Image (spheres, grey):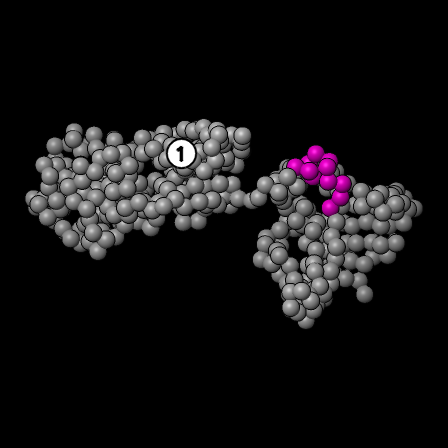
Amino acid sequence: MKRLVIGTRKSELALWQAKWVRERLIEAHPGLEVELAETDTAGDRDLATPLPLVDGKGVFTAEIEEGLRDGTIDLAVHSLKDLPTELPEGFEIGAYCMRHDPRDGFLGKDGMTLADLPEGARIGTSSLRRAAQVHRVRPDVECVSIRGNLATRWRKLQEDEGMAGIILAVAGVARLGWRDRITEYLAPDMVMPAAGQGVIAVEVAAGRDDAAALVEGVKDGTVDAIVTDHAPHNDFEKNAEFELAPFGMIGLETSLALVITNLVAPGIISWERAVELMAAKPREILRVERVALEPGATADLTVIDPDAAWTVDAADFLSKAVNSGFIGVELTGRATDVYVGGYATLEDGAIVE
């Protein structure tokens, strides 16, 4: 049975959520082995800086994502509200778990609610959103920054005689079995919850296993060649009914840059391997004589600018075909000159008539 490793922060709430996901996975797949890998994040280590002033996105997720990137973990469990609006390239949300109570809750000393607080009372919260909305209801109170996991914030409340209460997400409080500490559930029309609050998100590395297997095959020699089945069909042909439209898309003008950008530049394969895959091996398979790069030999070669940066745009295609799955993709590397049978067919990026 497959073994999975879940990445998580070390806080009590984070571990509760990771264990909850582990239980759901084992319920769905009996016999599955699931381990937890605990990580400290920048947001966990820096408890002095007010959260809005903490530099960078994903302060609670970046270190865990490194595990996804290098393959030491298979998935990461987060509170959805802790994730940045846009995930870093290479990651995606694999699952959203059922949403629990999305409201914020006030944990007041001596059973107090917001309305019970004396004028000028101090409330602990690390959220500008919560502070702004509380001030709309109680403009007289002072909202002070309080950092740390739920247990740390509760301890700070008990130790600070001048603090009247703290505001926390109800879902997190409930997961730790602390509902009895909530003195007021803040209605959404009083304090609107954060987007995604109460949702456990499962983050994974983007891409499919079959794509990863293809890349591995390119690396280990299982794949002999990378070629294109150039299909120069015009828009009229491609816009026909699905069963009547000719298959394929233009690849001749993008394949080289795709290999450079996605395989050579990241160091997955060498330039020598790229030349073997795209030039030497295809000729060998088709029993075409190898090109000799030596004085007096007939020029059959392509000159490449490996650093040329460009964006795939259908308007720039030289073929009559303009259908591509890579429109808008930013690529690196492009052919500048092509010689076939000793004659130039492309010079400085322009077709030779």
**The C terminus: image quadrant:** bottom right
**The N terminus: image quadrant:** top right
Number of numbered tags placed on the structure image: 1
Camera-side residue: 20 or 93?
20
State the SS at label 1: helix
Q: At 67% across and 46% down in the image, what residue appears?
A: 259
Q: In the figure, residue 345 lies in which quadrant? A: bottom right
Residue 14 spot, x, y in % from top left: 35, 34
Q: Is residue 300 above or below residue 111?
A: below
Other residues around mark 1 within 10 Å, as few (<14) / some (14–19) / many (≥20): few
* Label 1 sits on residue: 23
Q: At 57% across and 44% down in the image, what residue appears?
A: 208
Q: At 25% across and 42% down in the image, what residue appears?
A: 170
Instruction: Answer whether residue 278 is visible to the viewer in this image.
Output: yes
Residue 224 spot, x, y in % from top left: 76, 41
Q: At 27% across and 46% down in the image, what residue appears?
A: 101
Q: Residue furthest right?
A: 296
Instruction: Specify start and end residues of the magenta stretch as a single range.
Output: 216-226
Residue 103 spot, x, y in % from top left: 25, 47
Which amino acid does the dot numbered 1 rest on? Glu
Give the side of residue 244 with respect to residue 175, left or right. right
Q: Residue furthest bottom?
A: 236
Q: Is residue 216 above or below residue 287?
A: above
Residue 335 spot, x, y in % from top left: 73, 52
Q: Is residue 72 above or below residue 97?
A: above
